[in-house]
Image: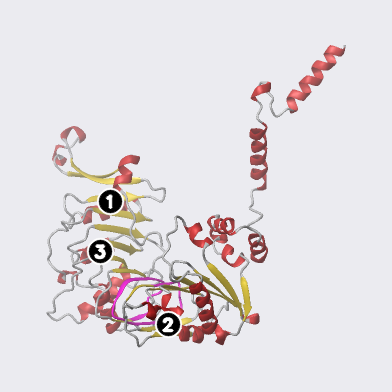
Amino acid sequence: MGKRARNERKKRQEEHDPGHGRGRNDFDPQTSNADRDDKIEEKSGDDFISRLPDDVLQRIISLLPLRDAARTGFLSTRWRGLWQSGLETLEKDVTVDDIGQEIGYFLDDAKKLGLLTSVQKFGSILSLIEHCRRIRFNFGDSGFLLATMMPNGSLHLDFYSKRNESPIDFELLWTSASYYILPFYDAFFSAVSAFNYVRSLHLIAVTNLTSEAVSSMLSQFEFLDNLTIKECHGLHSLRIDIRFAFSNLMIFDCLQLKSLHIKSNQIYKFWFRGLLPSFIYESYRDMEDAMLDFRGGPGYDHFECKHSLSLRSAIRKARILTLCRWTFEVMIRQYLAAWKGLPMFVFSELEELQWIDNEVDEHSIDALIFFLKSCPSLQKLYINIDPTSYREPRTRQNMDLVLDCKRLQCLEVVQLEGVMENCDKMLLAKRLLDVVSKETKIISKSHENRIWKFEVSLCQQSQIQQPLLQGMKHYMFVEVNEEESGKLSSKHSHADL
């Protein structure tokens, strides 16, 4: 009787035992707990932590070490900027008019710590962040400024304020009367302003409340090499009038910008993402790297011919270029309207092109080929089809005035990306055969990074039933293996932006 009761009790225990069906030595409590946690996570289905308000998340992040706090920025786009505002920093109550003076004091302290004068190399971004210096300037109820000085000479000024649905228009002005002079004596370094040690400046979310103070402060950066302006809602006009050459100008997502006037000895790299403003570029040398991502459309009421000529002149010597089809058509339409025996423009030094379009049809392909025939040195072509890109009202244009150039002998690869049906890919690839060489590889890349290679072959008699089709060309995309995929595919220099 007792044995039977023990057997029944043992049977019930095995049915509820997580290690049921395994030997005593096979049971792994960690595996069991992991399985249980997976089931709990599947039942929950929601990320409750990310649903917390920003101020609560920032408070949580402020309790973490700097390295761990920075890692939270990789969790998702929601967490990307939270760690910067969540970290505990020095705070100071100031007025908006004191921004320039306070930033000067901040840079003086950074200079004394060697953040501006010493050249350091860091193995990772996290290592770089650990050596930065930060301070928060409070403007009362109107907002605050988070200033971060990196040890590589990069200053980040991130403005926080209540965002209005209808931001007030303002302008930014950067002027300088100084020429770029190389200092040769240590005595010069000891007397120079700390502003002149800053090589890279990032202005984020400047508003009409802080625009005058920022413009006043900009004039003190005499040796600035890189300027990034991002998400400045209400920025209506930007004018840069400096006497020295600086390398990089980047403007991202300033959607109210209507007017952009640049006067400088040289800008090597110009990256712009947003709506196309009226554009004036005055420089002794042309840009070498230009990203003109105007897929959102025009931000102007009337794009005059002088703006079109200025934009074309700025990029005519570019080696790397991103261009939207509708932007090119605006430039070429005004050029052809005034074309009276003038020589056609040629992008003679262009090596890498990213072409953005909203669809694939005969008209859009004509515009692409029209442009390609003016790029004799092109080596890599990336065609990105984005249906959300701006659609310019179509007008009849004479595409026969283009240079009668030979095939693009330097073109190594054409990569098709974005949203395209198989028939669109086939039409585009077949049309491109008219301008590319036999050695040019045409590939198609999916969102999952799968690669198809375009191939052309002659129909054999064994493959067809109608003898009349023998010898005709057969077109198809063939998927390649992973090893060959790594050799064929590549990224445009502006792709990760």
Q: Earlier in the sequence, mark 2 or mark 1?
A: 2
Residue at position x 31%, y 67% in the image: 323
Label 3: state its secondary structure.
helix
Query: Label 2 is placed on what type of residue?
Result: Ala
Residue farthest toward the right in the current orientation of the protein: 1
Label ID, residue 37: none
Residue 301: quadrant of the picture: bottom left
Q: Earlier in the sequence, mark 2 or mark 3?
A: 2
Q: Nearer the viewer, residue 53 or 479?
A: 53
Is 478 displayed left or right of 294 in the figure? left
Residue 79, horizontal then vertical, whole percent: 57, 60
Q: Is residue 257 visible?
A: no
Residue 263 is a magenta residue: yes
Q: Is residue 74 above or below residue 234?
A: above
Decide: few, some or many residues near mark 3? Use Cα within 10 Å; few <14, some 14-19, many ≥20. many
Separation of residues labelled 2 and 1 (CA atoms): 65 Å
Residue at position x 60%, y 85% in the image: 95
Label ID, residue 426: 1
**Protein image colouring:** secondary structure
The region drawn magenta spans: 250-279
